[in-house]
């Protein structure tokens, strides 16, 4: 039911926007005096719905300008961000090395997908992300047991933050 309500609200907002546009375009003519009255009456209620038409108007533009490669890169970057968040969630006191390694493996897989996805990220930012992730990967590989992991949590969190900063640069490049 709320879906129908949203659709109705969008259609009403679109109709109001079209009436406003029609009112603006018909003002030069002598009969332009009559149509502006309904559009003025329509503009009062649509003043609250003005953001909806602008959102609807910009959405097709964004869809038109977003290339499939940009979408693929954003999807891959977001998947990497999710894997990184999962990794960071596992970096807590009492964490098991196996869980941290599994999360790290997901990050490696997501980074491979990100590097394969065409996009507008600069090579320098991709290289910085890869270097930060490699540093983190090497640190995780050097941990042999849960006691050692407990001692390394601070440095692993710092390395994960470096990866996060590098990912932010990549996300900015591809405008996600």
Image (tube, rainbow, N blue to C red):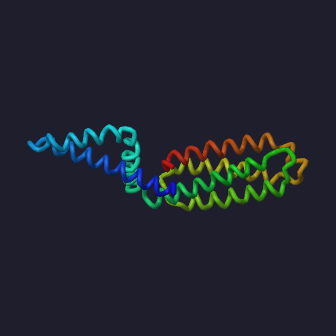
Answer above or below: position of 69 versus 128.
below
Where does the image place residue 27, in percent across and percent down from the top left?
A: 15, 41
The reply, left or right, for residue 36 in relation to residue 172 is left
The reply, left or right, for residue 87 in relation to residue 44 is right
Where does the image place residue 24, in percent across and percent down from the top left?
A: 21, 42
Residue pictured at 83% horizontal, 44% vertical: 152
Where does the image place residue 169, in percent across and percent down from the top left?
A: 56, 44
Of the pair 153 and 51, the residue shown nearer to us: 51
The reply, left or right, for residue 161 in relation to residue 47 is right
Of the pair 53 and 152, the residue shown nearer to us: 53
Residue pictured at 57% horizontal, 51% vertical: 126
Q: Which residue is the extreme one toward the right?
A: 147
Of the pair 70 and 34, the residue shown nearer to us: 34
Residue pictured at 53% horizontal, 51% vertical: 123
Residue pictured at 23% horizontal, 43% vertical: 38
Of the pair 87 and 145, the residue shown nearer to us: 87
The reply, left or right, for residue 41 in relation to residue 137 is left
């Amino acid at each position: 039911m709320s879906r129908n309500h949203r659709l109705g609200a969008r259609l009403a907002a679109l109709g109001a926007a079209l009436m406003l546009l029609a009112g603006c375009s018909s003002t030069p003519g002598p009969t332009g005096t009559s149509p502006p009255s309904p559009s003025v009456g329509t503009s009062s209620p649509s003043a609250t719905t003005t953001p909806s038409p602008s959102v609807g108007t910009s959405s097709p533009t964004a869809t038109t300008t977003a290339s499939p490669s940009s979408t693929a890169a954003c999807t891959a970057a977001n998947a990497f961000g999710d894997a990184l968040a999962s990794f960071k969630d596992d970096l807590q006191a009492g964490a098991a090395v196996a869980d941290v390694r599994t999360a790290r493996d997901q990050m490696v897989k997501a980074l491979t997908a990100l590097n394969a996805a065409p996009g507008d990220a600069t090579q320098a930012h991709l290289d910085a992300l890869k270097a930060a992730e490699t540093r983190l990967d090497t640190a995780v590989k050097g941990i042999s047991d849960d006691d050692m992991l407990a001692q390394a949590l601070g440095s692993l969190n710092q390395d994960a933050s470096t990866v996060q900063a590098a990912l932010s640069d990549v996300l900015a490049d591809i405008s996600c």
